Amino acid sequence: MTDRLKALLPWLWRRVFPHGALGEIYPVIPWTMTETSQVPGEGGAISLHRRGEEFSIRVDGRELMNSRRHGSEEDLAHLACKAIAGLPDSRILIGGLGMGYTLATALKRLAPSATVMVAELVPAVIRWNQKFLGHLAGNPLDDQRVTIIQGDVAQIIAESSQAFDAILLDVDNGPDGLTHKENDRLYQTGGLAAAHKALKPGGALAVWSATKDSSFTKKLSSAGFAVTINKVHARAGNKGARHIIWLAKKK
């Protein structure tokens, strides 16, 4: 840095921040905990936090999702619905309600005659969507096409045969589980075989993940799926962290 530039820095600072430091102009809003609950089984503590109009769901203090970063959740629905486009009476299963962004996007893409079943393991997440979070995604739980079930999506899949045109899994952190270790069975050989059986011919399985996993791609192929890997961003406009969505078509 030249001496001339060093001399200009105080002047530039006063021009950019005439009333003081940035923190004095825009006070930092602290996070506050709204509610806390427990993940069924041995999943740990799950909590809802708020900072102004921003919300965060955390498990044992680690952020699981944030209302400012939901682009990849919407991409999950876009990819799955595109794969079954043209079906007037499609039946969809979504594993994981989250903050409702995947569900809301699917409803925009699906026909009025479609039906969507959402399975959410954690009762508190359903309650938070009904009480605190619904407005973020346009209150998708109010749509008459939606049925919300408090329960394990793995059990619903295991008990189904050629029942769904698409299954969307946004459960935990993907194949590398974070909140509930029993979710891992969804992504193992038996769970993928059950998903294959639960889909109608030509149906699609879409799986969201925070990280890539080459071994999971192989498992999908071995289970009888034609697989494509999609790299997406956490925020709209190709911004934020990169996430992975596997789109697996039933052969």
Image (cartoon, helix red, strand yellow):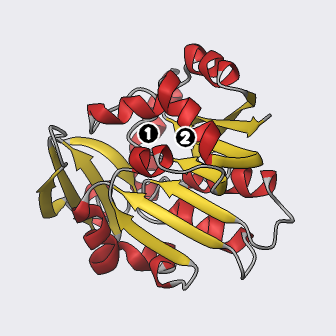
Left-right relation of 243 to 59: right
The residue depicted at 55 percent of the width and 31 percent of the height is: 192
Q: Position of residue 232 (x, y in %)?
A: 65, 40
The residue depicted at 48 percent of the width and 53 percent of the height is: 69
Residue 225 seen by the camera: yes
Question: Can you tell which quarter of the image residue 37 is in?
Answer: bottom left
**Mark 1 or 2, nearer chain start:** 1
Q: What residue type is labelled 2?
A: Trp
Q: Mark 2 points at which residue?
A: 208
Left-right relation of 165 to 14: right
Where 85 falls versus 138 (above or below)?
above
Residue 9: mark in rendering: 1
> Crowding at label 2, few (<14), some or many (≥20) Cα neighbours within 10 Å?
many
Which part of the image, by quadrant, shows the C terminus? top right
Question: Can you tell which quarter of the image residue 172 is in?
Answer: top left
Residue 173: mark in rendering: none
Q: Position of residue 250 (x, y in %)?
A: 75, 38
Q: Position of residue 65 (x, y in %)?
A: 38, 50
Instruction: Determine whether the residue tagged by mark 2 lies in a helix, strand or loop.
Output: strand
Task: Pick the residue in front: 101 or 118.
Answer: 118
Where 72 falls versus 185 (above or below)?
below
Q: Which amino acid does label 1 sit on?
A: Leu
Left-right relation of 113 to 186: right
